Protein backbone atom coordinates (compact mmCIF):
# COMPACT_ATOMS: atom_id res chain seq x y z
CA UNK A 1 0.00 0.00 0.00
CA UNK A 2 1.34 3.42 -0.97
CA UNK A 3 2.01 5.61 2.05
CA UNK A 4 0.67 9.18 2.26
CA UNK A 5 2.97 11.86 0.89
CA UNK A 6 3.47 14.75 3.29
CA UNK A 7 4.03 18.30 2.12
CA UNK A 8 4.58 21.33 4.36
CA UNK A 9 0.92 22.38 4.47
CA UNK A 10 -1.04 19.34 3.29
CA UNK A 11 -0.77 15.60 2.76
CA UNK A 12 -1.72 13.32 -0.13
CA UNK A 13 -3.24 9.88 0.38
CA UNK A 14 -2.46 7.89 -2.78
CA UNK A 15 -3.20 4.21 -2.14
CA UNK A 16 -6.25 4.26 -4.48
CA UNK A 17 -4.56 6.08 -7.37
CA UNK A 18 -2.66 4.49 -10.21
CA UNK A 19 -0.50 7.58 -10.55
CA UNK A 20 1.38 8.49 -7.38
CA UNK A 21 2.82 11.84 -6.33
CA UNK A 22 5.65 12.75 -8.70
CA UNK A 23 8.00 15.56 -9.61
CA UNK A 24 5.97 16.63 -12.67
CA UNK A 25 2.90 17.73 -10.72
CA UNK A 26 4.91 19.58 -8.08
CA UNK A 27 6.89 21.35 -10.80
CA UNK A 28 3.77 22.39 -12.69
CA UNK A 29 1.87 23.52 -9.60
CA UNK A 30 4.80 25.59 -8.35
CA UNK A 31 5.72 26.98 -11.80
CA UNK A 32 2.29 28.17 -12.90
CA UNK A 33 2.00 31.95 -12.81
CA UNK A 34 -0.66 33.59 -10.66
CA UNK A 35 0.20 37.12 -11.82
CA UNK A 36 -3.25 37.50 -13.35
CA UNK A 37 -4.86 36.74 -9.94
CA UNK A 38 -7.20 33.94 -11.03
CA UNK A 39 -10.50 33.72 -9.20
CA UNK A 40 -11.48 30.40 -10.78
CA UNK A 41 -9.17 27.42 -11.38
CA UNK A 42 -9.75 24.06 -13.06
CA UNK A 43 -7.51 20.98 -12.72
CA UNK A 44 -8.16 18.53 -15.58
CA UNK A 45 -7.39 14.89 -14.73
CA UNK A 46 -6.81 15.60 -11.07
CA UNK A 47 -5.74 12.15 -9.81
CA UNK A 48 -4.84 12.59 -6.15
CA UNK A 49 -5.72 16.29 -6.32
CA UNK A 50 -2.14 17.44 -5.84
CA UNK A 51 -2.22 20.24 -8.43
CA UNK A 52 -5.43 21.71 -7.06
CA UNK A 53 -4.04 21.55 -3.52
CA UNK A 54 -0.80 23.29 -4.50
CA UNK A 55 -2.81 26.06 -6.16
CA UNK A 56 -5.10 26.31 -3.13
CA UNK A 57 -2.00 26.90 -1.02
CA UNK A 58 -0.56 29.44 -3.46
CA UNK A 59 -3.63 31.42 -4.52
CA UNK A 60 -6.69 33.25 -3.25
CA UNK A 61 -8.93 31.72 -5.93
CA UNK A 62 -12.50 31.43 -4.71
CA UNK A 63 -13.30 28.36 -6.83
CA UNK A 64 -10.86 25.50 -7.47
CA UNK A 65 -12.54 22.70 -9.39
CA UNK A 66 -11.10 19.37 -10.46
CA UNK A 67 -12.20 16.63 -12.89
CA UNK A 68 -11.33 12.96 -12.45
CA UNK A 69 -12.84 10.15 -14.51
CA UNK A 70 -11.46 7.09 -12.67
CA UNK A 71 -13.72 6.14 -9.73
CA UNK A 72 -11.11 5.24 -7.12
CA UNK A 73 -8.92 8.22 -7.96
CA UNK A 74 -12.00 10.46 -7.69
CA UNK A 75 -12.73 9.15 -4.18
CA UNK A 76 -9.10 9.69 -3.21
CA UNK A 77 -9.14 13.23 -4.57
CA UNK A 78 -12.29 14.07 -2.60
CA UNK A 79 -10.69 12.66 0.56
CA UNK A 80 -7.54 14.72 0.06
CA UNK A 81 -9.57 17.87 -0.56
CA UNK A 82 -11.73 17.33 2.52
CA UNK A 83 -8.67 16.67 4.66
CA UNK A 84 -7.00 19.94 3.67
CA UNK A 85 -7.23 23.45 5.08
CA UNK A 86 -8.92 24.64 1.88
CA UNK A 87 -11.86 22.22 1.66
CA UNK A 88 -14.34 25.08 1.26
CA UNK A 89 -12.67 26.16 -2.01
CA UNK A 90 -12.04 22.72 -3.54
CA UNK A 91 -14.50 20.51 -5.43
CA UNK A 92 -13.92 17.42 -7.57
CA UNK A 93 -16.29 16.24 -10.32
CA UNK A 94 -16.47 12.54 -11.20
CA UNK A 95 -16.76 12.95 -14.96
CA UNK A 96 -14.97 12.78 -18.27
CA UNK A 97 -13.84 16.04 -19.81
CA UNK A 98 -16.44 15.53 -22.54
CA UNK A 99 -19.23 15.19 -19.95
CA UNK A 100 -17.95 18.11 -17.92
CA UNK A 101 -17.89 20.58 -20.78
CA UNK A 102 -21.52 19.80 -21.64
CA UNK A 103 -22.75 20.32 -18.08
CA UNK A 104 -20.69 23.31 -16.90
CA UNK A 105 -21.32 26.93 -17.92
CA UNK A 106 -18.39 28.21 -15.84
CA UNK A 107 -15.28 29.72 -17.41
CA UNK A 108 -11.93 29.50 -15.68
CA UNK A 109 -9.12 32.03 -15.29
CA UNK A 110 -6.53 29.27 -14.91
CA UNK A 111 -6.66 25.73 -16.26
CA UNK A 112 -3.94 23.33 -15.21
CA UNK A 113 -3.23 19.75 -16.25
CA UNK A 114 -0.61 17.06 -15.95
CA UNK A 115 -2.21 14.95 -18.70
CA UNK A 116 -1.66 11.30 -19.60
CA UNK A 117 1.08 11.51 -22.21
CA UNK A 118 2.76 8.14 -22.62
CA UNK A 119 2.48 7.66 -26.37
CA UNK A 120 4.75 4.60 -26.66
CA UNK A 121 3.20 1.31 -27.74
CA UNK A 122 4.22 -0.45 -24.53
CA UNK A 123 1.46 -0.98 -21.98
CA UNK A 124 1.89 -2.32 -18.48
CA UNK A 125 -1.13 -4.66 -18.49
CA UNK A 126 -2.63 -2.78 -15.53
CA UNK A 127 -5.73 -1.19 -17.06
CA UNK A 128 -6.12 1.49 -14.40
CA UNK A 129 -2.48 2.55 -14.61
CA UNK A 130 -2.53 2.47 -18.41
CA UNK A 131 -5.62 4.69 -18.51
CA UNK A 132 -3.93 7.15 -16.20
CA UNK A 133 -0.64 7.16 -18.10
CA UNK A 134 -1.27 6.72 -21.79
CA UNK A 135 -2.09 9.63 -24.05
CA UNK A 136 -5.04 7.99 -25.75
CA UNK A 137 -7.01 8.28 -22.47
CA UNK A 138 -7.03 12.05 -23.05
CA UNK A 139 -5.60 13.00 -26.46
CA UNK A 140 -3.89 16.38 -26.63
CA UNK A 141 -6.30 17.49 -29.35
CA UNK A 142 -9.33 16.80 -27.15
CA UNK A 143 -7.70 18.41 -24.13
CA UNK A 144 -6.85 21.60 -25.99
CA UNK A 145 -10.19 21.86 -27.76
CA UNK A 146 -12.14 21.47 -24.50
CA UNK A 147 -9.83 23.69 -22.48
CA UNK A 148 -10.15 26.49 -25.04
CA UNK A 149 -13.92 26.44 -24.51
CA UNK A 150 -13.60 26.52 -20.71
CA UNK A 151 -10.93 29.25 -20.52
CA UNK A 152 -11.85 32.86 -19.80
CA UNK A 153 -10.75 35.46 -22.38
CA UNK A 154 -7.78 36.61 -20.31
CA UNK A 155 -7.07 33.21 -18.75
CA UNK A 156 -4.09 30.87 -18.92
CA UNK A 157 -3.62 27.15 -19.49
CA UNK A 158 -0.57 25.61 -17.82
CA UNK A 159 0.53 22.11 -18.72
CA UNK A 160 3.50 19.74 -18.52
CA UNK A 161 4.34 17.41 -21.41
CA UNK A 162 7.36 15.48 -22.72
CA UNK A 163 9.84 17.78 -24.44
CA UNK A 164 9.66 15.61 -27.57
CA UNK A 165 5.94 16.47 -27.87
CA UNK A 166 6.42 20.24 -27.54
CA UNK A 167 6.37 21.24 -31.21
CA UNK A 168 3.36 19.06 -32.02
CA UNK A 169 1.48 20.25 -28.94
CA UNK A 170 2.01 23.93 -29.77
CA UNK A 171 0.85 23.30 -33.34
CA UNK A 172 -2.35 21.67 -32.04
CA UNK A 173 -2.89 24.54 -29.61
CA UNK A 174 -2.63 27.17 -32.32
CA UNK A 175 -5.39 25.42 -34.28
CA UNK A 176 -7.82 26.21 -31.44
CA UNK A 177 -6.55 29.77 -30.95
CA UNK A 178 -4.13 29.16 -28.07
CA UNK A 179 -0.55 30.44 -28.13
CA UNK A 180 2.44 29.86 -25.85
CA UNK A 181 3.54 32.82 -23.74
CA UNK A 182 6.04 31.02 -21.54
CA UNK A 183 7.99 27.74 -21.83
CA UNK A 184 10.39 26.18 -19.34
CA UNK A 185 12.27 23.11 -20.58
CA UNK A 186 13.30 20.72 -17.82
CA UNK A 187 16.36 18.47 -17.46
CA UNK A 188 16.99 15.90 -14.75
CA UNK A 189 20.59 17.12 -14.41
CA UNK A 190 22.46 19.95 -16.10
CA UNK A 191 24.13 17.67 -18.66
CA UNK A 192 21.22 15.30 -19.25
CA UNK A 193 18.77 15.53 -22.19
CA UNK A 194 15.71 17.73 -22.01
CA UNK A 195 12.86 15.69 -20.54
CA UNK A 196 9.79 17.89 -20.00
CA UNK A 197 8.26 21.14 -21.23
CA UNK A 198 6.22 23.38 -18.95
CA UNK A 199 3.99 25.48 -21.21
CA UNK A 200 1.69 28.43 -20.52
CA UNK A 201 -0.95 29.10 -23.21
CA UNK A 202 -3.20 32.14 -23.71
CA UNK A 203 -5.52 33.45 -26.41
CA UNK A 204 -3.07 36.30 -27.18
CA UNK A 205 -0.14 35.68 -29.56
CA UNK A 206 3.00 37.18 -28.03
CA UNK A 207 6.75 36.85 -27.71
CA UNK A 208 7.51 33.61 -25.88
CA UNK A 209 9.58 33.70 -22.68
CA UNK A 210 11.73 30.54 -22.95
CA UNK A 211 14.16 29.20 -20.35
CA UNK A 212 15.51 25.95 -18.91
CA UNK A 213 15.51 24.32 -15.49
CA UNK A 214 17.76 21.52 -14.22
CA UNK A 215 16.44 19.63 -11.19
CA UNK A 216 19.66 18.12 -9.81
CA UNK A 217 23.39 18.78 -9.81
CA UNK A 218 24.01 15.19 -8.71
CA UNK A 219 21.73 12.49 -7.31
CA UNK A 220 19.64 14.10 -4.52
CA UNK A 221 21.70 17.29 -4.74
CA UNK A 222 19.23 19.83 -6.08
CA UNK A 223 19.92 23.01 -8.01
CA UNK A 224 19.22 26.37 -6.40
CA UNK A 225 16.59 27.08 -9.07
CA UNK A 226 14.67 23.90 -8.29
CA UNK A 227 14.87 24.47 -4.54
CA UNK A 228 13.64 28.04 -4.91
CA UNK A 229 10.71 26.86 -7.04
CA UNK A 230 9.54 24.02 -4.77
CA UNK A 231 10.71 24.93 -1.26
CA UNK A 232 7.22 26.02 -0.13
CA UNK A 233 5.99 22.45 -0.62
CA UNK A 234 8.60 19.76 -0.01
CA UNK A 235 9.32 19.05 3.67
CA UNK A 236 13.06 18.55 3.19
CA UNK A 237 13.79 21.63 1.08
Image: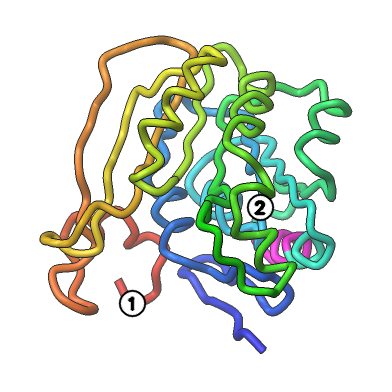
Element type where label 2 sits in the image: loop
Identity of the residue drawn at 70% across and 65% down: 80
Along the line of sight, the residue nearer the viewer: 56 or 5: 5
Q: Is residue 71 above or below residue 31?
A: below
Q: How many marks?
A: 2
Along the line of sight, the residue nearer the viewer: 154 or 144: 144
In which quadrant is the N terminus drawn?
bottom right
The disc placed on residue 223 is none
In which quadrant is the C terminus drawn?
bottom left
What residue did someone put label 1 on?
Answer: 236
Left or right of 178, for residue 14? right
Q: Is residue 23 above or below residue 198?
A: below
What is the chief secondary structure element of the magenta stretch? Answer: helix
Element type where label 1 sits in the image: loop
Left or right of 81, for residue 214? left
The answer to whether the residues at label 1 and label 2 have Cβ atoms under 8 Å apart is no
C-alpha gap between disc 1 and disc 2: 25 Å
Identity of the residue drawn at 57% across and 48% down: 115
Give residue 31's position: percent from left, percent from top.
Answer: 37, 45
Boundaries of the magenta span:
77-84
The disc placed on residue 46 is 2
Snapshot quadrant of residue 192: bottom left
Snapshot quadrant of residue 216: bottom left
Amino acid sequence: MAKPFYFKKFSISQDRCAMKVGTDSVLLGAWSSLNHSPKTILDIGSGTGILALILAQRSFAEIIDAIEIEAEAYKQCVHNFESSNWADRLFCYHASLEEFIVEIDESYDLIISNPPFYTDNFKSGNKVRDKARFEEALPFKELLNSASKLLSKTGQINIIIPFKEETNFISLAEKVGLFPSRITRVRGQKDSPLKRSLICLTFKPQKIDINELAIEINRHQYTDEYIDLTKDFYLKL
